[in-house]
Image: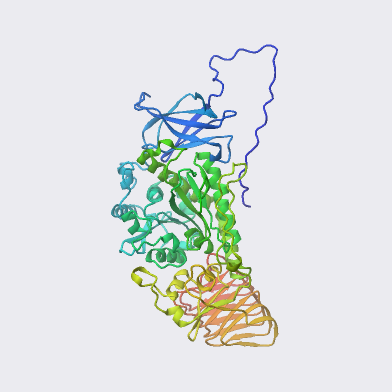
Amino acid sequence: MRRQRPTLIAVSTLIAVTLTTAAPAPANAAPPDQVTALTAHQADGYTTLAWQPVDGATDYQIERTPVDADNTPTGAPTIVGIWRPNRQINQQAPTFADAGYNPGDTFQWRVRARTGTTEQPYSDPVTATTTAPWGNPTTPGEQLRTGWETTHAAQYTSDTDEYAYTAAIDALSNRVRVVELGRTVQNRPINMMVIGHPTPATTPEAVAATAPVAINCNVHGNEPGDREACLIMARQLAFSTDPRITDLLSHTTVLIVPTINGDGRANNTRGNSTGQDLNRDYSLIRQPETTAYIKMVRDYRPVAGYDGHEFGNSRAGDLPMLPPRHQNVAQPIFDQSQDMIEGHMYAKGAEAGWWACPYGCEGGGNVGLSEETILRNTLGLKNVTNSLLELRSSGGQTRPDEGNTANNRRRKTYSALWTFHQFLDYHRADRADILKARSEAIESQAANTGRLVFRGSRPIPAHPAPHPGDSPPPLDAPPADLILDNPPCAYKLTDAQYNGARTDGPGGVGTTVAQRIAAHGWKVITIGDDHYVPLNQPERGLIPLLLDGKGVEKLTDGERIYPTLTGRRNGPLAVTGFTCADDATINGPVTVRAGAALVTTATTISGPLTATGAAGILLADSTVNGPVRIAATDTISIIDATIAGPVDLSGNTTGTDAPVLAGTTIRGPLNCTGNNPTPHNLGIANTVHGPRTTQCAAL
């Protein structure tokens, strides 16, 4: 059951009692309107300050003073924070995360309320030494530090230092394996750290079986705060003996891509070396950087993700977040992503003192819309629970000390570090719900039902009640001409469209549509010179955006192919050419001839289904009342089907595109032999009422 969004608990009104004789106030009673019960809790790179609220306070000022070992001030007291009621959900337990200091130093904090502009008395001070950077300086592995850490946030970690740092982690920790996903335009490696306990799984398919999580740390080269957090967290995950860390890594694999845009980071530019904003290219994959990431998603199949950015708005929250909003994203994925943000991040942020809010809060402007080219939307369309993370790029009115560049950088990096750890905790606690949402999304997408929207986003509330109404992300409602109420069965591409040369890549050279479809991992059926991309696939919501004439940012104008077989048909059926059945009932055996293809949704076949040498068999949300035998066939996908009989998949050679058998009930034995590659189940188990043999034993 998904948790309810947090709501404020009303505070009971205190009943004033008039006494005949007033008791004298204790000598140490706090003055009226003075903050009391101030505490300071230390964490990685920040201090959570908490106090009792003062009735009628408009806001609170947080003061920090550096002190020595004898608590003697070594610098001037400074107002470092302003707590306002719109910072958090639970306004009756105010907290503030102070991160604008060098970790390991000692400070004194005080907090005072303001009523309007009237300053009330300061609280009694609390003094504490902050937590030093994680890792024992004398322990191999733990002693590693990034360039950002060694310069005390004066410089960001360079690309060469990043490669040396991640290579050292790989060499010193059995938990970490660094793999190269690809190369940038300027030939810098795009590395990913694969982290698991006691060791990570050895192949992408084996990693996928662990329900991995992925963090994309730096897509815009001039937004490096999240990247520094990822590098620090990688060290913690690699070497920590904390039971929390080892438990997390024992139940999943963490995939960290520190820098997808190495060229932009080296040059401190938003785009890559061609000027392309990579966060507007994850669906089109015109650039090698985005292609590498999308292939990783295809092969490693992360079930949840975070995408790190910085946001140039000094009025926004510390941590603006946003789910995949495109209306083609399956409802379970949108709901689960919102639960992660509002149900977990907002609540935990209120405990730790970070101001989490929707991207766009406090005058965010035209942000967070429905472009499928943006990673959070692309991942949502790929059935990944995920969120954007925006680090406010400057301190603003709520963090007035962050005109100091190093302090501002620390707040950004350590707030991102907090977020990514909370992301791992959420996955650990809600893994079952995440996987359930993913399964439901894949099955609903493969059913190919409901309208298609080519641009349009779901609404996002300003903040859960009773939060004051900050600015919500704007509603990007789909216009009527970008809605298709009658979705086709497939798109047909000519060979020129599919394999033809393109000029939309770096230097005027682009990969073909065929190569990009393969990178996305979609099934394609080839018959003669025609190439069919069926919609009864897990990424149904994304396919039309790239292949339909209505697509706003498309690859080509494919021809819509509508069902050729509907209603009832009695007697044997021999399939030739490309046949699409939707909401059909076929009373009799079905034979798919060599070189032909059958695509079905919501269809019942009362009899055996046999295919030998077929171009493709894609069944979704369908029933076969009889045995199924598929041999020597080029393209195979069976999702959310019911088969009342034995299933045999034998001798199917499908290139790099493994046969899919997922979420299907088989009332008989399942035999898979001689298939290359081996069939897989997308992480959605099948129910088999009979023995499972050889290649399908684990499905």
Left or right of residue 235, residue 531 in this image? right
Viewer-nearest residue: 482 or 20: 482
- Vertical relation: 15 (above or below) 690: above
Q: Residue at x 36, y 23 (%)?
A: 72
**Quarter where residue 104 is shown:** top left
- Judged left or right of residue 40, residue 185 is left
In this picture, residue 418 sits left or right of residue 21: left
Q: What's the colour scheme?
A: rainbow
Nearer to the camera, 457 or 631: 457
In the displayed structure, 323 sits above or below 483; it is above
Report x, y in % for residue 492. 53, 79
Where is residue 523 shown, x and y percent of the image? 51, 74
Percent across and percent down for residue 683 are 53, 64
Q: Residue at x 66, y 88 (%)?
A: 572
Q: Quadrant of the C terminus?
A: bottom right
Q: Is residue 230 visible?
A: yes
| Count of labels in the image | 0
Using the rendered view, name the quadrant where residue 17 is placed: top right
Residue 167, can we see it? no
Q: Is residue 42 above or below residue 670?
A: above
Residue 44 x, y percent position in the rendering: 42, 41
